[in-house]
Image (cartoon, rainbow, N blue to C red):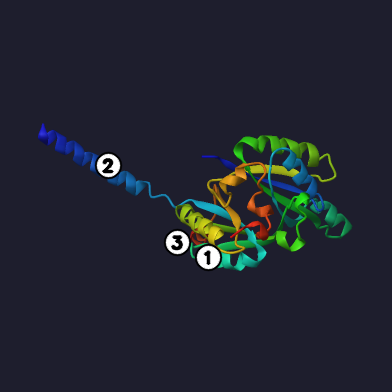
Amino acid sequence: MANAKNTTTKTTKRSTKKTAKRNLAPNKLVMLVTVVNRQKAEYYLDLLQDFNANLQLDISAFGTAPKLLGLLEGDIEKQVIFSVIRQDVAKKALETLEEKFKTIRNGKGIAFTVPLSSTIGVAIYQFLSNAM
Amino acid sequence: MKKFEVIFCIVNAGFSEEVMEAARNAGARGGTVMHARGTANPQAEKMFGVSVQANKEIVMILVEDSIKEGILHALYGAVGQKSKAQGIAFSMPVEDVVGLSAKAIVPQEEQPTVQPAEEDPQ
């Protein structure tokens, strides 16, 4: 009995090893969208570079302030940053961003990730994921 | 945990206010407006020898999953292809969101995109 048990565990171990090798799929990519005040955009671009974001696009935009608050024009100038990062670092990136949103003066913003379904070209994938 | 979706609405330049008005009436809180250029009708451009770069505005609105459908319908009615805005709207699933405080769920509060910095007491 003991022998039989041993053999079964061995085989399962082997099979998991095999499947693990087979399932070495490349990491998924996500698009990280960050909306921040325009003055703080440079800071956040640098911050996101640490998460292997090789491709970053930043676009100037405006927040849609409700009229009843009567805001100054300058207050709603925003910058939208689109960065492509790997899914496994997305969580850490968002956590870091959240902390910065809370602590940095005038650095409030929102950020979210959208999964990318596909990309074409190995070199492009390597560039986007910063994998060698 | 609440699920979010991001709605993109592409309209002719100058119609972002109408987009936001329709979206707000359907429960959205705030959005971000980006300027863009549309590249439509290349045949006509060739024919007349001019390059028409239609100015567009893209409105990005982060909303809860539950009110997404209502907002898309509102946008279709208010700024759809039949209106002068000639808008198209689509939504994408969002994995994770940060920066929307718990307060933002309360209708009175605005999401950070629309908040002035001065409102933050810290």
Q: Which of A2 and A17 is in front in this view?
A: A2
State which tag comes first along the sequence, 3 or 2: 2
Q: In this view, does A12 lie to the left or right of A95?
A: left
Q: Are marks 2 and 1 in contact (CB under 8 Å)?
A: no
Is residue A116 positioned above or below A107 on the image? above
Establish whether labels 1 and 3 are both on one chain. yes
Residue under numbered circle 3: A131
Label 2 is found on which chain of the structure?
A
Secondary structure found at label 1: helix
Q: Position of residue A34 (x, y in %)?
A: 60, 56
Name the residue: 80% across, 39% down. Answer: B78
Which residue is at a point 51% across and 52% down the rendered structure image? A29
Q: Which of marks 1 and 3 is in front?
A: 1
- Mark 3 touches mark 2? (CB < 8 Å): no
The residue tagged 2 is A15
Number of the label disc, if any, that sits on residue B115: none
* Coordinates of residue B119 in the picture (x, y in percent): 66, 57
Q: Which of A124 and A93 is in front in this view?
A: A93
Tell me which residue sits at (59%, 64%) in the image.
A105
Residue A51 position, x and y percent, is 48, 62
Residue at which label 1 appears: A47
The Cα–Cα distance between marks 3 and 2, rounded to whole angstroms, is 28 Å
Does label 1 or label 3 sit earlier along the sequence?
1
Which amino acid lies under the numbered mark 1 shown in the image of this protein?
Answer: Leu
